[in-house]
Image (tube, rainbow, N blue to C red):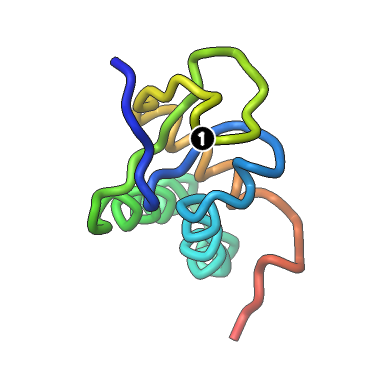
């Protein structure tokens, strides 16, 4: 089922448009706030719990944020280029865990 993205949705994909989408910017901020806790977590279960918390924070937005995947296969340069569908919980978790593992020090500032 095709959906229309809102400003809190996280678009799964690559490229300038996706990277700069408001929901993706917010997602990265939320993930970066939790990244020090993720790095400090010793057990995989703890890391997964932190990642699920990021998903819950995105989903508790107003309007609720969703993790969306483009099923059109086209290159996304504007929102209307994609045919957006809600990604599975597993796919969303994969996205968050990948973000948490990234070693980009510019994005993770520990206060």
Residue drawn 62% across the image and 29% down it: 76
The image quadrant of residue 3 is top left
Q: What x and y, as percent, mark residue 110?
A: 62, 79
Q: Foreground: 84 or 33?
A: 84
Q: What x and y, as percent, mark residue 6?
A: 35, 45
- Examine the rendered structure and indicate whether residue 14 appears above or below residue 31: above
Farthest bottom residue? 111
Residue drawn 24% across the image and 52% down it: 63
- Examine the rendered structure and indicate whether residue 1 appears above or below residue 99: above
> Residue tagged by mark 1?
79
Residue drawn 60% across the image and 31% down it: 13
- Examine the rendered structure and indicate whether residue 38 appears above or below residue 45: below
Q: What x and y, as percent, mark residue 14?
A: 67, 34
SS type, badge 1: helix
Image quadrant occupied by the N terminus: top left
Residue drawn 49% across the image and 29% down it: 80
- Examine the rendered structure and indicate whether residue 44 appears above or below residue 93: below
Image quadrant occupied by the C terminus: bottom right
């Amino acid at each position: 089922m095709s959906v229309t993205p809102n400003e809190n949705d996280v678009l799964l994909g690559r490229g300038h448009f996706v990277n700069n989408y408001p929901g993706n910017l917010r997602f990265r901020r939320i993930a970066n706030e939790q990244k020090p806790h993720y790095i400090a977590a010793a057990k995989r279960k703890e890391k997964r719990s932190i990642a699920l918390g990021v998903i819950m924070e995105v989903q508790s937005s107003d309007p609720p944020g969703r993790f969306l995947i483009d099923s059109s296969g086209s290159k996304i340069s504007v929102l209307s280029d994609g045919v957006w569908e809600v990604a599975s919980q597993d796919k969303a978790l994969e996205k968050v865990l990948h973000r948490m593992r990234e070693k980009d020090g510019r994005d993770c500032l520990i206060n």
